[in-house]
């Protein structure tokens, strides 16, 4: 009974932490003159990726690299199909109103680079340095764009936030979100894993499904709250930023602690991850809204993927 209670506690913490992080991030954007999209691509995205980082590094150290790879690949798949699908079924994500093309190209490039390295053979510390170098280059571009936007003096339309919110309160929201998300995810994943093992589920499936979905719950919580507040740029930017940080940052750092073998067993998952990334083209390149029907379709595709894994 205790693992079930702790799992529920972890989920509650995730929901409140996700709300706090979105509130802090959008108000920070307003305060310092940086677009909410840039903030979501950095603070929000990296903060919600903290559980993946903790679990992947721990898995490599504990000589379970398959969980580390499955965690990141599975999380990226869940981020697109589930994290965008479920909120869209609740409330239409008006992604037509935000420009995420540059961030999307970063994510797509990171996906292709990662797949190329994975298909080349075992991922080593050299692969890790390549991934981290690519991440540093993306962050440098984003920082330059953020400075250019601030210097342009353009006003950012951030409806629903409090322009008079004091800096200390913004800091409290950000800290509560960044601290609460990994704590909630850790509680949920650890206890859900105990439940899964007691039911006889294999370690590989746990990495690609239970752990991946569990560590994607911060993104889901943040995206649901962003959708509720009408912040489609934060919702989509969070997913895009989390995905390229998962591949470049999390695996890059994990590889500094040990190699990660990539066998044929992951070929299907890598292909699904690429297809999921390409599914964002209508919303990013053609500025289509993610409607409830699209949300239903994305969620259904994820359920099909899970069914294939369990066959």
Image (tube, rainbow, N blue to C red):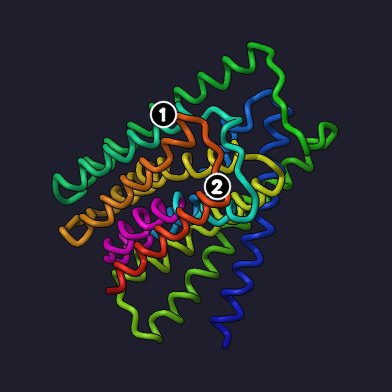
Mark 1 — residue? 138
SS class of the residue under badge 2? helix
Q: State yes or no: residue 164 in magenta.
A: no
Asked whether, in this view, residue 226 is left or right of residue 112, the answer is right
**Between 56 and 104, which is closer to the camera in this rendering?**
104
Who comes first in sequence, dot 2 or dot 1? Answer: 2
Residue displayed at 23% across by 55% down:
260
Q: How many marks?
A: 2
Above or below 158: residue 301: below
Above or below 256: residue 289: above
Q: Which residues are magenta?
A: 57-79
Quadrant showing the N terminus: bottom right
Q: Is residue 129 visible?
A: no
The Cα–Cα distance between marks 2 and 1, rounded to whole angstroms, is 17 Å
The extreme top residue here reads 152
Quadrant showing the C terminus: bottom left
């Amino acid at each position: 009974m205790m693992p079930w209670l702790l799992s529920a506690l972890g989920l509650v913490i995730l929901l409140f932490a996700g709300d706090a992080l979105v509130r802090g991030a959008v108000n920070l954007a307003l305060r310092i003159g940086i677009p909410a999209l840039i903030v979501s691509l950095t603070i929000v995205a990296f903060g919600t990726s903290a559980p993946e980082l903790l679990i992947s590094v721990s898995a490599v150290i504990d000589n379970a690299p398959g969980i580390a790879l499955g965690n990141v690949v599975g999380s990226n798949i869940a981020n697109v199909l589930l994290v965008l699908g479920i909120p869209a079924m609740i409330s239409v994500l008006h992604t037509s109103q935000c420009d995420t093309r540059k961030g999307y190209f970063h994510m797509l490039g990171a996906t292709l680079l990662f797949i190329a390295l994975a298909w080349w053979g075992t991922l080593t510390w050299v692969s890790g340095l390549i991934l981290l170098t690519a991440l540093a280059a993306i962050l440098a571009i984003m920082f330059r764009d953020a400075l250019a936007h601030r210097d342009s003096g353009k006003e950012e339309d951030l409806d629903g936030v409090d322009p008079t919110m004091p800096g200390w309160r913004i800091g409290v929201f950000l800290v509560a979100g960044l601290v609460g998300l990994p704590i909630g995810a850790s509680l949920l994943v650890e206890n859900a894993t105990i439940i899964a093992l007691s039911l006889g589920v294999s370690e590989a499936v746990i990495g690609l499904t239970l752990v991946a979905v569990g560590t994607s719950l911060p993104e889901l919580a943040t995206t649901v709250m962003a959708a509720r507040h009408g912040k489609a740029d934060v919702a989509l930017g969070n997913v895009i930023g989390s995905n390229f940080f998962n591949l470049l940052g999390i695996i890059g750092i994990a590889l500094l602690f040990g190699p990660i073998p990539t066998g044929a067993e992951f070929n299907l998952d890598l292909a699904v991850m690429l297809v999921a990334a390409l599914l964002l083209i209508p919303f990013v390149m053609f500025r289509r809204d993610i409607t409830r029907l699209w949300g239903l379709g994305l969620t259904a595709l994820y359920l099909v993927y899970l069914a294939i894994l369990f066959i």
